[in-house]
Amino acid sequence: MAKRIDVSGLSAYYGSHKAIDDISMTVEPRSVTAFIGPSGCGKSTFLRTLNRMHEVTPGGRVEGKVLLDDENLYGAGVDPVTVRRTVGMVFQRPNPFPTMSIFDNVAAGLRLNGSYRKSALNDIVEKSLRGANLWNEVKDRLNKPGSGLSGGQQQRLCIARAIAVEPDVLLMDEPCSALDPISTLAIEDLVGELKERFTIVIVTHNMQQAARVSDRTAFFNLAAVGKPGKLIEIDETERIFSNPSVQATEDYISGRFG
Amino acid sequence: MSHATTTGVQERPTPAPPAPKSGLSTRSLPRLAPLGFAVVAIVLGVGLSLAAGWQSRVQWGLISALFFLAISYVTTSVVENRRQARDRLATSLVWVCFLLAVVPLASLLWTTISRGSERLDGYFLTHSMAGVLGPEASGGVYHALIGTLEQVGIATLISAPLGLLTAVYLVEYGKGALAKAVTFFVDVMTGIPSIVAGLFILSIMLIAGLEPSGLMGALALSILMIPVVVRSTEEMLKLVPNELREASLALGIPKWRTILKVVLPTAIGGIATGVMLAIARIAGETAPIILLVFGSQLINTNPFEGAQSSLPFYIYEQYKIGEAASYDRAWAAALVLIAFVMILNLVARGIARWKAPKTGR
């Protein structure tokens, strides 16, 4: 059951240094939203505030509201651990758990949060691996270590691990930047399939990828050097890439900076 | 002049292409040239020392080493070029230092094995010194072995969990003043001399009116062991990449479970190695044992009451007796102790290899 995200007035700090300033936007359920922008403009920071991972960094602090279907993730009494079970994340570099087999990796989110019968786990693991387009490649070696796969396969394993817990939202932080073009294409196709089930937010450096994969695109930029990042424009992907409203967006898209 | 000393050694002619010196290729010495230098250097060194009447073998060795370095540098810079000469000098220095470090160790092992194996047999390992007088050529080390195993075992049972949990706190949780204080005190504890740890437990023993026993010795050993375990576990935990913790947290796994099920299993090989090495270190501590365990000739399998012996104590005791038979026993016990430590080391390596994150397909 994918949910919608409403962000209002979100600012994030590292200690006393403000990284992103006053961001407000809406992400529709069962859609793919891409965050683009030059390096250091706060896209990844903003992404990490959506599943309360920003506060894991020492000194990380957030002000503002993030509503997941009208529930404030930063409300009083909300446990970050519960938030992270609802909002999953896939990271830039594939990071399967090295001491666990492929099966255990996919089942980790479930096993470490509750107890399941073996048969139920088998079903969920198969369903997640199929959902990540990895089942056919690993079905014969589920108890081999996860680190024995290629880069693209490892990233799909991490995606399977993330969707196994059935989150409402899936956040992807530059998931293809460490992969070759063929694996990138596989992941992009996968994103297209997954959006039927989840709300997806993807940060990417690659504008062509944003154009291919997303329904809506948000452009972030720094107000000036040393200033915090801001949301400049968010719109339908087609309109951003053909006829953006803000000049800075137009400059970034056409490669005049960034 | 250096040509004169080396022409006798170089059997094969130097492969010298007729290329001019300003080309890309230079002449090069044959591969066995360093061996030749070594032979010549040893001959010169020993000859010079004998001529000067120096007796110490160590002096001979050092002089030969210096000759080796000089010959190697000069010959290489004449035949090849300056850079090769410096390269060879550096390589030679490394080799010389390595040999200087290894020779005493090899000599120690050789002496212990040859002297110790005279007396080492099944009888020695299974009998104690009960009723055996110093000069008699019988008796064994069984009581000391039991003592060492029990004291070291209890110390490990105390220190390993404490050290592990402290390290987990310092790496995963500690951010404030308490963490800094703990780190500081662990550093201080690393430097405590073993006799001071023994005196500390002795004072507690006297104040509380307790008797000497294996347990007291184990307590002193654990004071010495805890900081070693904390330091090595800290290093192993820091080696676990942060991405793994983040991946686990992002799945909604609480922090304590992340540490227990993801971080610790990844680091467990190195942690086990650290614990084994800490054990190896305290197995040879003599001072606190003398103070606290009193030593005994009899087998005492109860560490909680009564005096016990231990291997280092036994070695010291037999040495003090001063008879030929007791020296033999001391050497044999030393061999047993070294073998014990070596077995622990091998077990540690085995565990590390078995538990290392696998990359098999």
Image: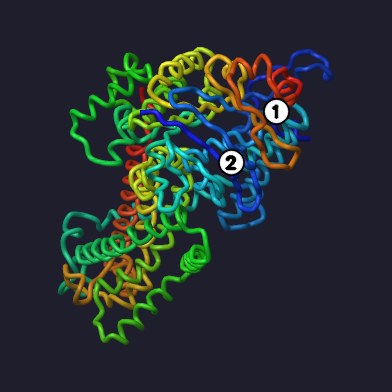
Which residue shows up at 36% across the image and 54% down it? B275
**Residue position marked by numbered label 2 in the rendering:** B95
Bin the neighbour count of mark 1 within 10 Å (Cα to Cα): few under 14, some 14-19, many 20 and up: few
Which residue shows up at 44% across the image and 26% down it? A29
Residue B191: in sight, yes or no? no
- Label 2 – label 1 distance at C-alpha: 24 Å
Which residue shows up at 40% across the image and 57% down it? B229
Q: What SS does tag 1 mark?
A: helix
**Residue position marked by numbered label 1 in the rendering:** B7
Q: Amino acid at mark 1?
A: Thr
Q: What SS does tag 2 mark?
A: helix
Q: What x and y, as percent, mark residue A138? A: 32, 18
**B290 lies left or right of B103:** left
Q: What x and y, as percent, mark residue B352? A: 36, 42
Label 2 or label 1, whichever comes before in sequence order? 1
**A233 lies left or right of A75:** right
Q: What x and y, as percent, mark residue B170? A: 46, 57
Q: Are marks 2 and 1 in contact (CB under 8 Å)?
A: no
Q: Amino acid at mark 2?
A: Trp
Placement of A150 over or under B158, stated as above or below:
above
| Residue found farthest to the front | A70
Q: Nearer the viewer, residue B264 or B137?
A: B264
Q: What x and y, as percent, mark residue B200? A: 39, 78
Q: Quadrant of the C terminus of chain A?
A: top right
Q: Nearer the viewer, residue B28 or B285?
A: B285
Q: Answer yes or no: are tags 2 and 1 on the same subunit.
A: yes
Q: Nearer the viewer, residue B352 or A220?
A: A220
Bin the neighbour count of mark 2 within 10 Å (Cα to Cα): few under 14, some 14-19, many 20 and up: few
* Chain letter for mark 1: B
